[in-house]
Amino acid sequence: MMPTTFRTASAHSPELPLHLAEELTGGGAQALIQLGDQIYTLRITRQGKLILTK
C-alpha cells in the first residue's frame, strides 16, 4: 500500500519524505507498519505523541 501523502519535509531536510501520522492511521489512533517480516504498531497518544512498538 502506497502512502496517500508524499511531501518533502521542511527546508531543514527537503530530501526526506514527510508522512502525516493521521493519514498513516487512517484518522484513527493506531496503524500497523511492516518492515521486512516484522510488524510494528504506531500509536498516537491522547497527548499527541507517537509511540512505535514491536
Image (tube, rainbow, N blue to C red):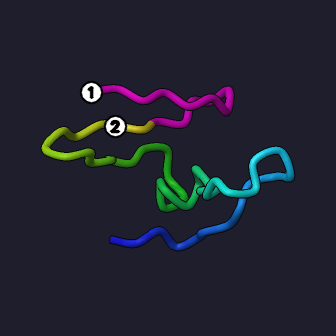
Magenta-tinted stretch: 43-54
Q: Quadrant of residue 52?
A: top left
**Of the image marks 1 and 2, the number of the one nearer the N terminus:** 2
Q: Residue at x 47, y 68 (%)?
A: 3
At which x and y percent is residue 51?
48, 27
Q: Residues within 10 Å of mark 2 (few under 14, many from 20)?
A: few
Q: Given the image, on which type of amino acid does mark 2 rest? A: Thr
Residue at (35% x, 26% y) in the render? 53
Q: Quick check: marks 1 and 2 in contact, CB under 8 Å?
A: yes
Residue sticking out furthest to the left: 37
Q: Nearer the viewer, residue 26 or 8?
A: 8
Q: Amino acid at mark 1?
A: Lys
Q: Position of residue 20 (x, y in %)?
A: 62, 55
As helix, strand or loop, the secondary structure at mark 2 comes to strand
Residue at 19%, 46% in the rendered image: 36
Q: Secondary structure at mark 1?
A: loop
Numbered circle sitting on residue 54: 1
Q: Vertical placement of 30 versus 26: above or below?
A: above
**Residue 42 shown left or right of residue 54 in the figure:** right
Numbered label attached to residue 16: none
Q: Is residue 50 magenta?
A: yes
In this figure, which residue is indicated by the disc labeled 2? 41
